[in-house]
Amino acid sequence: MSEPDVDSTSIFSQKTHLPDDTVFYSIYPDFSLNPTTSTATITAELHNLHLQILQTLAPFTTTYIFQHQPFTLTPVLSPLPHLHGRLRFGDNLEDEWFVSFLLFTVSQSFPNLSISLHDSDGQFLLIETAFHLPRWLNPNTSTNRVFIRRGRLYILPPSHFPNTPDLITALKFLSENDNNPDILRATPDTVQLNLEKKIKEYPEKARKNVHGVRIRVPVSVAWVLKHEPCLISLAVGGFYDRDVDSMKFAEKMERFLPNGKEESVVQMFVKMSKTMYAQLMQQTFRPPKCYPRLPLSSDAEAYKEAELGMKIACGFEMVYQMRKRQGGEGKGSTWEVFRENLERSGYFQGLLPGSVEYKRLVQKADEYYRNSALHSRASDILNAPVRRIDEILALPHSADDFKVQELPPSDDDSWLYYGEDELNAALQERQKEMELFDSKRKRKQKVKEEEDAGPSAYDLGEIANSMQAFVKKMSSYEGAEVPESRDTKDVDFDADRFMKDMESVLRGQGFEDTGNDVDHGESSSSDMDFDDFEDDSDIAEPSEHEEEGGDAFMESYTDALNKELKPTTLDRSFIRANEETLKKDEGISNATEDMEEEFNPVDVDVNLVKSLLDSFSSQQGLPGPASNLLGLMGLQLPEDGKKGK
C-alpha cells in the first residue's frame, strides 16, 4: 500500500487481537546471533534446524489429536532469524502443556538454542510455579528474562540486568553463559522441581487424554475420517462453535448427505480428546430433517453411537461450507483483523462507513490484501481442509468398505460423570501448596520480628533468674564477674576509699563495734569484709560473741528501720507473695490485714522484674542503667510498644 501511515508489520504484531486461548512459542538458535554470518547461510541453517526439530517431535505429534490445530513451526528471518509458532488450545489445556513438553524436549535435543513460551495470560510457566518464585519477579519484570534452554527454565537475574533487557542482549547472555552457575541459581530449585513434575507427566498423560469411541455416521463422513483421522477436531470445532449462519448449512447437509435420508450409515471407531468427547456429549442437538432416522432410545448403545455420529456429521458440514465460502471470498478472519487495525491506525480518517471516500479506501485496502503474501497464506489455510475433503470424497467409496471390520469397544466414559475426584485432588494439591507457602511466609516474618526485637527472651522469669545468677557470682573487691561471653571492660573500683567512707558513715550513726560476720575464707558480692581494713582509726577487735553481736545489730537496725518507715506508704509500693489471694476476702478486718501484711513476705523476683521494666521503660529507648545491666546478663528487651501512649 502506498500510504506511508499504514504499516502491515506493526498491524499484525499487536497481541490485543489474538485469541485468548492461544500459546505462542519462538525458538532462537545461537547461530542467528552471529552478525558476521551471511543471510544465505543463516537461512539454510534455519531450514535445516526446522526439519530436524519436526523429525524429533514426529513420534509424539503423529498420533496426538489436537483440539483446533496441529503443532507447527514457521521460519522467520526478520528482525532476528528464528522459528515461530502459535497454537490455539481452546478448552483443552492439555494441548498447552503438551506443547510445553514438546519444547522442553527440543531444548534437550538441541542444546544450542533458547526458547520463549507464553500464552494470552503471560508467562504461564511462572503462573504454575507462582508460590516458589523470587519476590522481585512479576509480570512487569519478567519481559525477556524467562527462557527454556537445555531442558531447564532460565530466569535472568536482576544482578546481571537491573533493567529489562532487550531480546538480543538476553539471548547473547544465555549463549555465552551456559556453564555459569549464577544463572541457574537465579532460578529457585523449587521452581525447577515443580515444572519437571508437571512436564514429566507427558507424553503418557497425552495418551491418556485420548478417548476412543464407536460412532455411526454417513459413509461420506466415515470415508473422510478413515483417510484423515485428525480432521475430527475440525468437525467437533464446527459443531461446538456453531452459530445461526452455520446452522443453515446443517439444515441442508448438501456435501455430506447428497442422498438425504437415503444416505448409508456405517459404524466406525474414532479417537478424539476427552475435551472433544465432552463437548459432543454435553450438548443437546436436534437432528436436521434431512438426516437419517436415529435408532430408538431403548437401544441405548446404538442411540448413543448414532447421536454422536450425527453431531460430527453436522459439524463437518458446517465447517466445510463456512471455510469454502470464506476461502472463495479470500477474506477469512485475517481480513477482519487487518480491516480493524486499519480503522484503529486512522486509515479511514474518521469517514462514515458507506460514504464514497470510505468505500474507495476499503477497495484500495482490499486490493493490497489480495496481492500480499498474507492473503495467499490465509487462503491456503482456509482452503486446505476444504480441498482435502474434496480430494478424499472424489475417491470411489461405498458402505461396503466398512462392513467387514472388527471394531474395539468404546472406552469407559465414567470420568465424564465422576470427574470430581480428580478435580478435588488437583484443588487439594493447590491448597497444600498455598498452605505451605503461607507457613513459610509466617515463619520468615516471625524470624524477622525476632531479629528486629533482638535476642531477648520474653519470659520475665528469665530476667529474675539471670539477676539471681548474677548476684551469686563469685566476686572480689575488684568487681563482680559478668558472663564470659560478654565483652566488657574491667570495673574501676577503689575498695580502700569505699571502706573508709563506709566506716565514717557507720561511726557517725553510733555503730562503732560492729564486728565481722563473714568467714575469712569466703567472699560474697553482697557482704563486706571488715578485717582487711587498715586505718589510723580505732576499730574494735572481734569478740567471742561476734555472731550474737551481729544478730543484735541486725534486729535493732531492722526495728529502727520499720519504725521509721511505718508512717510512710513505702511498704505498700512492694508486691507481696499471694497478694491477689489476700485481696479476694473482703470481710478481713484492718487488724487482720496488718497482721497478714507483716507475715506476708515481699515477692523479691516480681518486685525486681517490675522495677527493671519500669526503669527500662523510663529510658525511652536511650542507654541507661536498666538496659546496661540487662546487657551484662546477656538479655535485651524489645522496645516498649506503649511508648508515647
Image: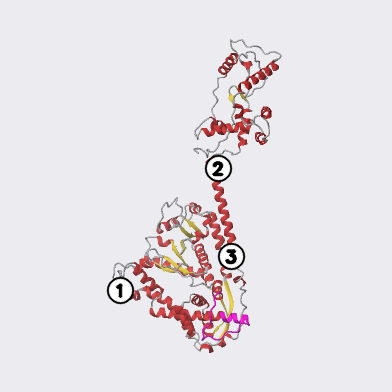
SS type, badge 3: helix
SS type, badge 1: helix
Is 476 magenta? The answer is: no
At horizontal 54% and vertical 50% (from top left) the residue drawn is 441
Q: Which residue is mark 3?
A: 423
CA gap between label 2 and label 1 equals 71 Å
| Residues shaded magenta | 282-307
Q: Is residue 451 left or right of residue 35?
A: right
Q: Is residue 152 above or below residue 284?
A: above
Residue 18 at x, y = what percent? 43, 68
* Kind of residue at disc 1: Tyr
Is 299 magenta? The answer is: yes
Residue 74 at x, y = what percent? 43, 69
Residue 255 at x, y = what percent? 47, 85
Q: Which residue is mark 2?
A: 450
Q: Which residue is mark 1?
A: 358
Q: Is residue 554 left or right of residue 504?
A: right
Q: Is residue 373 left or right of residue 155?
A: left
Instruction: Judge the density around disc 3: few (<14), some (14-19), many (≥20) Cα neighbours within 10 Å.
Output: few
SS type, badge 2: helix
